[in-house]
């Protein structure tokens, strides 16, 4: 799928935004948290069969290339970094700029690595040199409870907000990192109510993953993927933890609190196979945008949306 046709597909996002306040013809399960599956299919999945086949092949190729590069880089860094005395926790020792105009936080997914943000980080540091960029190693690679993964990042963001009150903050997360970014936003409402925050998630598993549920049915697969009981429970589709988080997201904002959400999903995502989990409801008092791309898998979507995502994020930053 070409960039032009992908971006053309994005023009229908307004239909879903409007449907947040609309009543559906019939009651649906989990309607408070996610959209009706028919609405999603009408908006994003009505393409000729040949286009769908091409997009599947493109997603497989892109996913293979992306994962090969990422895995190679991740393992080489794990070998080299200890020799250089570099530890994962060192990513939390950021020194904030004295005249910082804003903060970008890039959060990798489950069992991921900060290297996934190499191109994002390069773009931001060259295009927004007067902004801080924080790219942490998530605790236990996110293979733990949401709070354990997010709290060290939350402390650093609060530290920044104290030093630079009311400077805008952009939280970008991929997959489980999107879930972490969403959680961070809710936790910053109390002590950083006047700080404007943009949450931009890629293939976020906000309502869990049906694919992980299938994997967890098989003992051997559970052993191979090595997920903890905590993350298996939290990432189960429609889990109580997912509902609790989205309840917090949907809680009404104070008049002085401004929040913007941008969600990116893919029709060829093998992990978040149900688009509804990547495009959750957030409540009518937040600004929200939904974008769906074709021809990208769960991981490769990070690079697929990069230009669109960063262009929006930088425009948002520059107007604050």
Image (cartoon, rainbow, N blue to C red):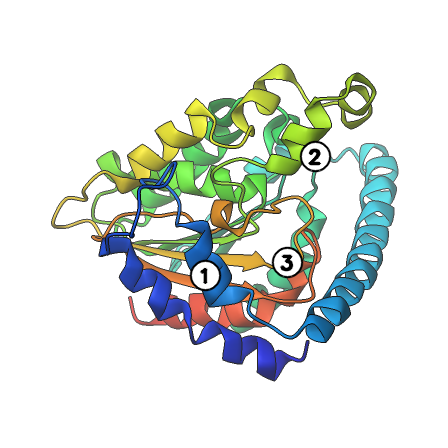
The residue labelled by disc 2 is 111
What is the distance, in whole Å, between disc 2 and disc 1 at their CAs? Answer: 28 Å
Which of the two discs, 2 and 1, sits closer to the camera?
Answer: 2
Q: Is residue 286 visible?
A: no
70 relative to 189, above or below: below
172 relative to 303, above or below: above
Q: Sequence order check: which comes first, mark 2 or mark 1?
A: 2
Going 53% across and 46% down the picture, which residue do you hit?
Answer: 204
Q: Give SS at disc 2.
A: loop
Q: Residues within 10 Å of mark 3 (few under 14, many from 20)?
A: many
Going 43% across and 62% down the picture, which residue do you hit?
Answer: 290
- Specify whether 59 is left or right of 230: right
Which residue lies most toward the front here? 26
The residue labelled by disc 1 is 131
- Specify whether 143 is left or right of 100: right
Q: Sequence order check: which comes first, mark 3 or mark 2?
A: 2
Q: Quadrant of the C terminus?
A: bottom left
What is the distance, in whole Å, between disc 3 and disc 1 at their CAs? Answer: 21 Å
Which of the two discs, 3 and 1, sits closer to the camera?
Answer: 3
- Specify whether 109 is left or right of 152: right
Going 65% across and 75% down the picture, which residue do you hit?
Answer: 48
Which residue lies most toward the bottom here? 4
Image coordinates for residue 19, horizontal then vertical, percent: 30, 59
The residue labelled by disc 3 is 302
Judging depth in this view, the residue of 154 and 309 nearest the camera is 309
């Amino acid at each position: 799928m070409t960039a032009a046709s992908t971006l053309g597909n994005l023009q229908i996002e307004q239909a879903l935004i409007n449907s947040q306040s609309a009543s559906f013809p019939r009651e649906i399960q989990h309607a408070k948290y996610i959209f009706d599956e028919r609405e999603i299919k009408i908006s994003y999945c009505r393409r000729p069969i040949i286009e769908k086949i091409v997009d599947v092949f493109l997603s497989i190729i892109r996913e293979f290339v992306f994962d090969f590069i990422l895995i190679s880089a991740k393992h080489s860094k794990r070998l080299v970094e200890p020799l250089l005395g570099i530890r994962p926790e060192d990513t939390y020792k950021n020194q904030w700029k004295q005249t910082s105009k804003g903060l970008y936080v890039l959060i990798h997914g489950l069992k991921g690595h900060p290297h996934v943000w190499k191109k994002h980080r390069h773009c931001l540091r060259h295009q927004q040199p007067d902004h801080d960029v924080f790219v942490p190693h998530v605790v236990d690679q996110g293979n733990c409870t949401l709070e354990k993964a997010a709290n060290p990042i939350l402390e650093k963001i609060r530290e920044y907000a104290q030093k630079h009150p009311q400077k805008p903050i952009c939280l970008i997360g991929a997959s489980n990192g999107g879930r972490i970014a969403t959680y961070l936003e809710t936790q910053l409402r109390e002590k950083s109510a006047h700080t404007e925050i943009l949450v931009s998630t890629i293939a976020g598993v906000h309502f869990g993953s049906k694919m992980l549920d299938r994997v967890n049915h098989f003992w051997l697969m559970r052993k191979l993927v090595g997920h903890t009981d905590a993350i298996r429970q939290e990432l189960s589709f429609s889990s109580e933890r997912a509902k609790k988080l989205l309840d917090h997201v949907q809680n009404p904002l104070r008049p002085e609190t401004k929040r913007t959400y941008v969600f990116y999903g893919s029709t060829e995502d093998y992990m978040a196979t149900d688009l509804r989990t990547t495009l959750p409801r957030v409540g009518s008092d937040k600004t929200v945008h939904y974008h769906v791309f074709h021809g990208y898998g769960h991981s490769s979507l990070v690079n697929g949306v990069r230009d669109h995502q960063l262009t929006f994020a930088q425009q948002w930053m520059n107007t604050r």
